Image (cartoon, rainbow, N blue to C red):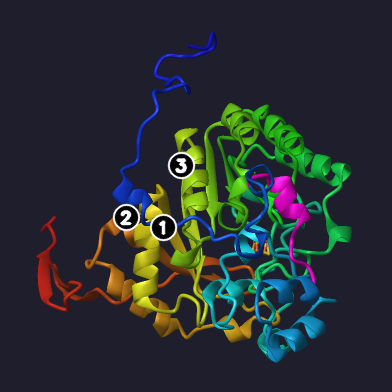
Amino acid sequence: MSDNKRDGEVNFNQPEYTTPNHILDRFPVAPRSIWSKVEDKDWNNWIWQQQQRVRNIEMLSKVINVTEEEKQAYDGSVEMFNMSITPYYASLMDADDPNCPIRMQAVPKLGELHISPEDLEDPLAEERDMPVPGLTHRYPDRVLFYTTHNCAMYCRFCTRKRKVSDPGSAAQKKQLDDALEYIRTHKEIRDVVISGGDPLSNSDDRLDYILTSLRAMPHIEIFRMGTRNLVTLPQRITDDFIYMLRKHHPVFVNTHYNHPKECTREAYDACRRLSDAGVVISNQMVLLKGINDDPKIVKELNHKLLMMRVRPYYIYQCDLSQGISHFRTPIEKGLEIIENLRGWTSGLAVPHLVIDAPGGGGKIPILPQYFLGKTGKTVKLRNYKKKEFTYVEPQE
Ligand code: SF4
């Protein structure tokens, strides 16, 4: 037991527990593809995974059978938004199916070259609400803190394409310190969302510096870290990282699984390590045409996430970012998905469907209509099977 353990805290060196095989069996180990001869010590090393990323069409052609459309899309998009895929994530791609849900998230498509009239460079107006560079302060008690513009993988549907993947726009130390100073002098802020890019692209030391600085501010209650590394680079969740993170509790992690194929044994292990260290993990899925716009897929994903101790939190309607309109779905699709979850499966598996309103309006929830009206004190409702019920309010 450590000397500084306080009442009610659990010792980190708890007895090991075993996950039943019938649960583990649902999480297949990544197939490794062309990297089958790579030694475990390299494959499981996040630095090696980053160094070996698939960044050009020649390398990509060794992993999958690249189509003519994908070649053209790569040539047309690479100047604007890099391609970068970790070997781990690349090994999950179907080599022969251009519509594989993993491949569609990682490999450019021609749709990226099309800018629709409604597309916006900064759809969420994040730059407008920046009191200092790299910090968005829109809501009264919380801020969004951009700490890097690098990511392990560049998701083709990224809403921050305007900055992400451009190494020249990454936050320097002075920018970080200016943002920290802003937070220090704004006592109304209690919640800091640490974002990017992917904040886990920072070194442990840099993250420790940021978190230690924030923890020294008595008005800061919680941190949320928004990372896709649990999906694209689960090897990043090392012992050192976990020991660093748990010094700064309470810490929440929001991640970004979009398809059940992403729920591998490696992903399971990474989530388990974080959860065991006391981190609460939630998932923010983006609704993507051809990838997860199907209630069965979302239900399967959410069931897997719960087994990984990840709470399905949001389904985002795809933003109006430039060059991602080919991923967008009609609003009815999201409503259909919620309609097929609510009541048909555990409430824990039902996330909030939201639109992050263009122009900086914030997240607006969208719900199927369960409230049918009210006469006097009598409320008319319908349930998930579309059967109608009444509820009577108190007379006073
Ligand atoms: S990890 Fe997040 S910030 Fe990075 S490319 Fe993917 S969606 Fe964009």
Q: Is residue 54 magenta?
A: yes
Q: Depth check: 108 or 131 in front?
A: 108
Whether pointer 1 and pointer 2 mark residues with C-beta atoms closer than 8 Å, the reply is yes
Mark-to-mark CA distance, 3 and 2: 18 Å
Q: Magenta includes 297?
A: no
Q: Nearer the viewer, residue 23 or 80?
A: 23
Q: Residues within 10 Å of mark 1 (few under 14, many from 20)?
A: many
For label 3, being within 8 Å of ligand 1 is answered no
- Identify the residue at horizontal 53%, vertical 52% (top origin): 254
User: In the image, 285: left or right of 32?
Assistant: left
Residue drawn at (65%, 76%), measured in percent from left and top?
A: 64
Q: Are marks 1 and 3 in contact (CB under 8 Å)?
A: no
Q: Nearer the viewer, mark 1 or mark 3?
A: 3
Residue 275, above or below 56: above
The location of residue 171, given as percent across then percent down, is: 82, 50
Q: Of residues 91 and 133, which is closer to you in this image?
A: 91
Numbered badge on residue 312? 1
- Image quarter where ligand 1 lies: bottom right
Q: Which residues are magenta?
A: 44-56
Name the spot of residue 28 as percent of width and height, x first: 44, 57
Residue indicated by mark 3: 272
Residue 137 vs residue 276: left or right? right
Residue assigned mark 2: 348
Residue 254 visible somewhere in the drawing: yes
Badge 2 local density, few (<14 within 10 Å), some, or many (20+)? some
Marks 1 and 2, how far apart at CA? 7 Å
Q: Quadrant of the C terminus?
A: bottom left
